[in-house]
Amino acid sequence: MTDSSESTTSIAEVIDKVAVSNLNGGTGPDVWVGEKLTEETVKDLLKLVWGEGGPERENLHRWSQGFAFSPSEQTALVQMFGGPCAVIAPVQAYLLRNSIYGSRALDQNWRAKNGPELLTDALVEMFALLSSPSFVVVLPSDLLRIPSKRDATTMEEGHPEVDAVENDNPNSPTDHGVHSDLKSRRFSTIDELKKFLTDKPSVFTTSFGILRFLYSFILSKTIAKVREDLEDPTEPLIDAAHGHGNQCLTNLLITGQAVCNVWDDVKEFGGLRLQGIPGRPAIGYLSLLESLRYVEVGFYLKCPQYPIWILASETHLSIVFALIRTLVESEAEEAAAIRAFKNYDEHGSGFISADKLKDVLETLNLFREDE
C-alpha cells in the first residue's frame, strides 16, 4: 500500500482520471440495477459507521476514492488521503495473501500479477469471513457526483467557498450524492458474489468505492450483528473528528468480528468478560504502541496463518510481510504455556489463584484426573 497524500494537486488529478476511466472503461459506464435501501437502513448504517451526526463533509471527502493501484507496483493499492487506511490496509493484506500464497501464486512472479483479479479474490475472501447466508453489495448511486479537481484542491487547502457554493444550491448534495440513492444487490452464495465482482469490477474502484465496500461488508454481516460484537454500540467505527477507523473496524475486516480488543480469546476483569480475537486469522496485526505498553497484542494476531501483518502506528496502518510461511506455522510449547497462563492472569501481575491452575493445565492438555 502506498500513500499519495503529499501532493494535493496530483491527488485531485488522480481522482478524476481513476474515477472517470473506471466509470467509462472504454465501453461506457455500468448500469446499476438494484433494490433501494430503506431510509431506516441507511440511517442505522450511517449511525454505526459515522456516529449520530453523520459524516463531516471533509471526512467524507477523504473517503471519496475507490480502490486504485499504483502505476509503479501492480499489486500495491494507493491511498490518496488520510483516513481510509483502516479499509485499504486489510484489503491490501488479503490481496498480498492471494498474490503470494493463493491459487494464482504457483510458478508466477507475485509482483507482476493482475491487480484487479487479485483485488476481486481478496474481497471475496474477506466476505467469506462473515459466514453469512447471503451477501450484499452496495451499488454506485445514479446521483453520484465524482469530486472534481477543484473540489479536491480547495477542500484539502481548507477553502470554505466550496461549502458556501454548494450550500447556496439546495439541490446540491453535500455528500456528492453517495448516500442520496443507495441501492444494493443480494447474492445467495459466495460464488454468485465472485461472478458479479468479476463482471463488474468498477463497483468498488470508482469514486467512493472503498466506502461502498465497507457498507457492503457491514450489511452482509448485518448491522445488528456488528453491534453485538461492539463493547460500546454507540461508538462509531470511524472517528467523527478525524475520519480514522477504530480498532473494531480493523478487527472486523481482518477476522469478520468487530471486537475492540487485540488479545487472545476472552479476558475477565472483576467479573466483566471482554472478548478478544477468537483464533488465528489469515492476516496478523502488530502495533508500535505495544512497545509503550499502551496495548498488548495477543499470540493469534502476532502469529497468523500467513506471514502478513498490518502494522499500526499512532496515525497510520501499513503492511509488513515475509515470503517464508514457516515463520508462522507452529507455536512453541513455551509460548503456548505463557499464552494459556495469561488467559487466567486477570490483573497481568504474573500470578494466578490456585483454583485456576487446573484450568491452565486443561487448556494445555496436561491435566489428568487421579485414577
Image (cartoon, grey):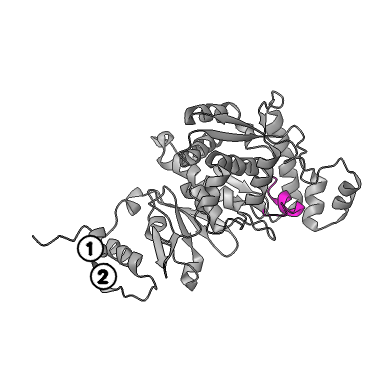
Relative height, residue 285 to residue 218 (above, below): below
Which dot marks residue 355? Answer: 2
Taking the magenta stretch, the answer to whether it contains residue 57 is yes
- Tell me the SS state at disc 2: helix
Crowding around mark 2 (Cα neighbors within 10 Å: few <14, some 14 to 19, many 20+) is few
Relative height, residue 158 to residue 124 (above, below): below
Q: Residue at x 54, y 48 (%)?
A: 226
Q: Which residues are magenta?
A: 51-64
Q: Which residue lies under the disc numbered 1? A: 361
In screen coordinates, is 190 left or right of 12?
left
- Asked if the residue under mark 1 is in contact with the one under mark 2, i.e. CB atoms within 8 Å, the reply is no
Amino acid type shown at disc 2 = Asp
User: For residue 334, which quarter of the picture?
Assistant: bottom left
> Could you tell me which quadrant the C terminus lies in?
bottom left
Towards the viewer: 61 or 183: 183
Towards the viewer: 121 or 38: 38
Amino acid type shown at disc 1 = Leu
In screen coordinates, is 347 left or right of 77?
left
User: For residue 277, which quarter of the picture?
Assistant: bottom left
The location of residue 231, given as percent across then percent down, is: 52, 58
Extreme-left residue of the structure: 371
